[in-house]
């Protein structure tokens, strides 16, 4: 899909104001190429090719929409279609010195009001787009960005013995509760269900060693996750990270899994490693 078509993916989400300005732009979940800048930041690769092999799910292309007209203008708040375009410092905020920032404007034909769809950085003047309607597409990149925005739940590590202390060369038990994550969000005009399932727990003992497990462990008398500390008179900070497999679906279509797992780092707790001292007593006294 062309860079222009990716911008019009927001068409279904933006209401036409009486006269919007470039400062009103809200590009939200707009999918873009890696080199396209949205509000000055390089976005995640959001290839919107409808081939499902490259991470894109076609959630429907049969809808029709209004006939549209589009126009690129320098990304300056004072610019508006039909008027003489001006330049401004905002044009020169791209990462590359060879590029300038442009705003894509749209209107419904024949006489709808113009409103901005989004911004992008180009080397030279972008080609004038044609009219038409593009059905929004939900992609792995858009879902990944949304999951990162929401944040996956962190796991809280529990230690036994309790009360922040254990003994050297003693089987210290670690466990946590299995995190749950299920959300329904609105993306590009679709209701998108997102689920994340823990697949691995990485336990950081705080002394430089780690271990991994497929489950969250359990409290005593279970000994699923244990560690023996070899140095006494130190305070360590154990923690547990959770790795998730994320899947999503748009408008109740088939589930699709993100290619790469995501890991949420857990917070640490202080644990003092003590040494037991033998105490002799006289049972006959």
Image (cartoon, helix red, strand yellow):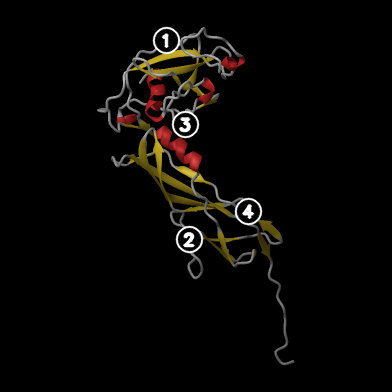
User: Label 3: few (<14), some or many (≥20) within 10 Å?
Assistant: some
Residue extending farthest bottom: 284
The quadrant where residue 275 appears: bottom right
The numbered mark, 1 or 3, whose residue comes first in the sequence reads 3
The image shows residue 104 at horizontal and vertical percentages of 45, 17
Of circles 1 and 4, the one toward us is 1
Of circles 3 and 2, the one toward us is 3
Q: How far apart are the alpha carbons under marks 2 and 4? A: 20 Å
In front here: 169 or 243?
243
Q: Which residue is mark 4?
A: 207
Please tell me whether residue 268 is drawn above or below residue 63 in the rendered image.
Answer: below
The numbered mark, 2 or 4, whose residue comes first in the sequence reads 4
Q: Which residue is mark 2?
A: 217
The numbered mark, 3 or 4, whose residue comes first in the sequence reads 3
Helix, strand or loop at label 4? It is loop
Q: How far apart are the alpha carbons under marks 1 and 3? A: 24 Å
Q: Which residue is mark 1?
A: 127
The numbered mark, 3 or 2, whose residue comes first in the sequence reads 3
Of circles 2 and 4, the one toward us is 2
Mark 3 vs 4: CB contact within 8 A: no
Of circles 2 and 1, the one toward us is 1
Residue extending farthest left: 62
The disc label shown at residue 28, or none: 3
Mark 2 vs 1: CB contact within 8 A: no
The numbered mark, 1 or 4, whose residue comes first in the sequence reads 1
Helix, strand or loop at label 1? It is loop
Mark 1 vs 3: CB contact within 8 A: no
Q: Is residue 245 visible?
A: yes
Q: How far apart are the alpha carbons under marks 1 and 4? A: 58 Å
Residue positioned 50% across, 25% down in the render: 25
Please tell me whether residue 97 is drawn above or below residue 160 in the rendered image.
Answer: above
């Amino acid at each position: 899909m062309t860079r222009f078509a990716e911008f019009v993916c927001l068409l279904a989400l933006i209401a036409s104001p009486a006269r919007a300005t470039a400062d009103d732009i809200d590009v939200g979940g707009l999918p873009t190429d890696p080199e396209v800048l949205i509000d000055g930041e390089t976005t995640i690769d959001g290839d919107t090719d409808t081939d499902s092999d490259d991470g894109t799910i076609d959630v429907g292309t049969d809808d029709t929409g209004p006939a549209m007209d589009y126009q690129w203008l320098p990304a300056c708040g004072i610019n508006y279609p039909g008027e003489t375009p001006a330049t401004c410092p905002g044009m020169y905020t791209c990462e590359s010195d060879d590029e300038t920032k442009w705003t894509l404007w749209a209107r419904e034909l024949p006489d709808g009001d113009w409103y901005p769809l989004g911004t992008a950085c180009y080397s030279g003047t972008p080609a004038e787009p044609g009219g038409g309607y593009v059905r929004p597409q939900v992609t792995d990149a858009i879902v990944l960005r949304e999951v990162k925005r929401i944040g996956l739940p962190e796991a809280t590590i529990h230690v036994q013995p309790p009360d922040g202390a254990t003994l050297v060369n003693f089987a210290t038990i670690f466990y946590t509760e299995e995190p749950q994550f299920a959300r329904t969000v609105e993306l590009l005009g679709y209701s998108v269900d997102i689920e994340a399932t823990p697949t691995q727990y990485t336990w950081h003992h705080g002394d430089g060693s780690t271990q991994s497990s497929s489950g969250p462990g359990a409290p005593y008398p279970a000994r699923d996750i244990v560690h023996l500390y070899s140095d006494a008179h130190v305070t360590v900070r154990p923690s547990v990270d959770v790795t998730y497999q994320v899947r999503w679906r748009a408008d109740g279509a088939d589930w699709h899994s993100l290619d790469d797992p995501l890991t949420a780092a857990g917070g640490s707790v202080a644990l003092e490693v003590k040494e037991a001292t033998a105490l002799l007593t006289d049972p006959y006294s």
